[in-house]
Amino acid sequence: MRKKARALIYGLVQGVGLRYSVYRKASQLGISGFVKNLPDGSVELVAEGEEDLINELLEYIKTGIRWARVEKIDVEWSEWEGKYRGFEIAF
């Protein structure tokens, strides 16, 4: 089932290669959307795709990025919109 997720990622998540790692993994999984740093030190992720693949991406973010220290991920799920073409790092 295709869904959209907006996630806010907290912890030591900026300056550690998280955005690039998320970009690579999301592209590999066929997820569209974006990832970007926020002024408060957190990272925003918007992902559209198969719900199980988005969950796989979220699990990867929690444990698979060597230098990041993810303390918390807040996720809001909504209906798939088909708004994004591919995945990108936003600035």
Image (cartoon, rainbow, N blue to C red):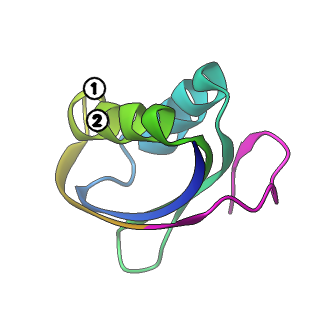
Report the front residue among 7 and 19: 7
Disc 2 marks a residue whose amino acid type is: Glu
Q: Is residue 81 left or right of residue 61?
A: right
- Counting from the top left corner in percent of width and height, residue 69 is at 17, 45
Identify the mark at residue 59; answer none if there is no mark. Answer: 2
Report the front residue among 12 and 33: 33
- Counting from the top left corner in percent of width and height, residue 90 is at 69, 58
Identify the mark at residue 6; answer none if there is no mark. Answer: none
Q: Toward which corner of the image does residue 62 lie, by quadrant?
A: top left
Q: Residue at x 80, y 53 (%)?
A: 84
Q: Is residue 91 left or right of residue 84?
A: left
Q: Residue at x 58, y 32 (%)?
A: 26
Q: Is residue 2 left or right of residue 19?
A: right
Range covered by the magenta-colored residues: 77-91
**Residue 17 visible from this viewpoint:** no
Q: Secondary structure at mark 1?
A: loop
28 vs 7: above or below? above
18 vs 30: above or below? below
Q: Secondary structure at mark 2?
A: helix
Q: Circle 1 is placed at which residue position? A: 64
36 vs 59: above or below? below
- Counting from the top left corner in percent of width and height, residue 27 is at 66, 27
Q: Are marks 1 and 2 in contact (CB under 8 Å)?
A: yes
Q: Toward which corner of the image does residue 55 lie, by quadrant?
A: top left
- Counting from the top left corner in percent of width and height, residue 74 is at 29, 67
Disc 1 marks a residue whose amino acid type is: Gly
Q: Is residue 74 left or right of residue 89?
A: left
Q: Residue at x 31, y 52 (%)?
A: 13
